[in-house]
Amino acid sequence: MTHTQAVPSWRDVAATGQLAKFTLLCLGVWLHAADSLLVATVMPAAVQEIGGVAFINWALALYHLGSILAAVVTGSITGRIGLRAGLALAAMLYAAGCAASAVAPAIGPMLVGRLMQGLGGGGMMALVYVAIHEIFPERFWPRLLVVVSTIWGASALCGPLIGGLFAEAGLWRWAFWAFAGQAVIVVAAAAFLPSRRSGPGGGWAALPLSLLVLGTVGIAAAGAVTAHGAVVAALLGLAGLGLLYAFALLDARHDRHLLPVDALDLRRPVGNGLLMVLALAASTTPFGTYGPLLLGLLFGVGPLTAGYMVALESIAWTWASIATAGVMGRAERGVDPLRRRADRGRRRRLCRRHARRIARGRGRLSDRPGRRVWHGLGLYGQADRRCGAGGGAGPGRRFGFYGPAHWLCRGRFGQRHRRECRGTRRRHRACGGA
């Protein structure tokens, strides 16, 4: 979209006749975004009934692992079966995972259901972006992506509260049933989407994805084997980190890589930025995973109150993101005037120094247009290049007047009257001096 095009309004989006379809697609975004925070508040009540408190972190790790795998393969599968069938398949997989978690008699079947939910939720999320690309013209994409981001923010606030309400009432299984019902609505909405196929997409690298899966499982297992000793847990954790590092190395060599090529290069902004995101996620995710459980065990806090506390954390990082969104732009706008002021001062000092050299007879000015201007110790073009005047002319660059001196000294030395300035004060004033 070019800068001259006006930003389309919602009336323009509605005129396409596809707004209702997009609204139904957004339900898939809601299910995927709210799932993790909702489950974090109902898992303490679930493990009290079915056991498996040592595997509580697996409920979230397997969900995110399934989401990553689904995001990788969704494009290729959708190209073969079409957008309509792809969304219906992802939503049915998510609904089946919710049902498996709702009826789970033990932690094992629930973890299988959580993996199915991750595969279905990640597929629905990826297909929303595919649908935006295929259904709407490019000029509508920014406005539609704003809606997707807004749904993510709303889910961060509402997910923990909804889960806390179900857990407080002793109906944690109904939280999964409620989300399964919403997934069925997405399956019905998929019938209104286009069914055209774009052809098989590019494949994915099996080895890097296998390393990603094994690394994630190793790190998750490290938290479940603490009863066997801290050494075993540490070895599993280190092995998982090593597998993830190997995944990043192999992924960079593949044509269809998941991460940026220089993700591991800390000398580049991309590597530093990804490291910052990893550190922030590692410092904030544990509270969302274990916070409700620990608050209940240590302080007797109920699920609803714990949900409010998780929601407050979500509110805090959402507000901080909005507040700091324009900080970099404001900082750059504040630096630019200071840089221009410093450049003007440096230019003025150079002009004064070279004018004094000429006044003392250590240099001379050319009397023919287009010639370079010598000043005893070098070229005016060199000084011009150092101080950034007149478009950055270098040595020997000609402007049709008296060379770069015309730009350096603001037109006083380089006029066409072929007259050299006489007297130190006059030369000093010509270069902007007092």
Image (cartoon, grey):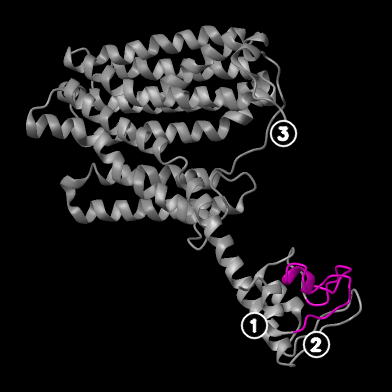
Q: Is mark 2 on a helix, strand or loop?
A: loop
Q: Where is residue 22 in the image (x, y as percent from the top left)?
A: 57, 14
Instruction: Determine the image quadrant of residue 121.
Output: top left
Task: State how far apart marks 1 and 3 are (Cα).
Answer: 47 Å
Q: Mark 2 points at which residue?
A: 364
| Among the two numbered marks 1 and 2 on one chain, the one whose residue lies closer to the N terminus | 1
Question: Which quadrant would the C terminus be assigned to in this image?
Answer: bottom right
Q: Mark 3 points at which residue?
A: 2
For disc 1, the neighbor class at 10 Å (few under 14, some 14 to 19, many from 20) is few
Q: In this view, does 95 lie above or below 284?
A: above
Q: Does the stretch in magenta take in 334?
A: no
Residue at screen point 68% across, 25% down? 6
Nearer the observer: mark 1 or 3; the answer is 1
Position of 149 compared to 86: left or right?
A: left
Nearer the observer: mark 3 or 2; the answer is 2
Residue at screen point 88% across, 78% down? 371
Q: Position of residue 157 (x, y in %)?
A: 32, 24
Q: Is mark 1 on a helix, strand or loop?
A: helix
Amino acid type, mark 1: Arg
| Among the two numbered marks 3 and 2 on one chain, the one whose residue lies closer to the N terminus | 3
Amino acid type, mark 2: Arg
Q: Mark 1 points at which residue?
A: 353
Q: Position of residue 251 (x, y in %)?
A: 55, 50
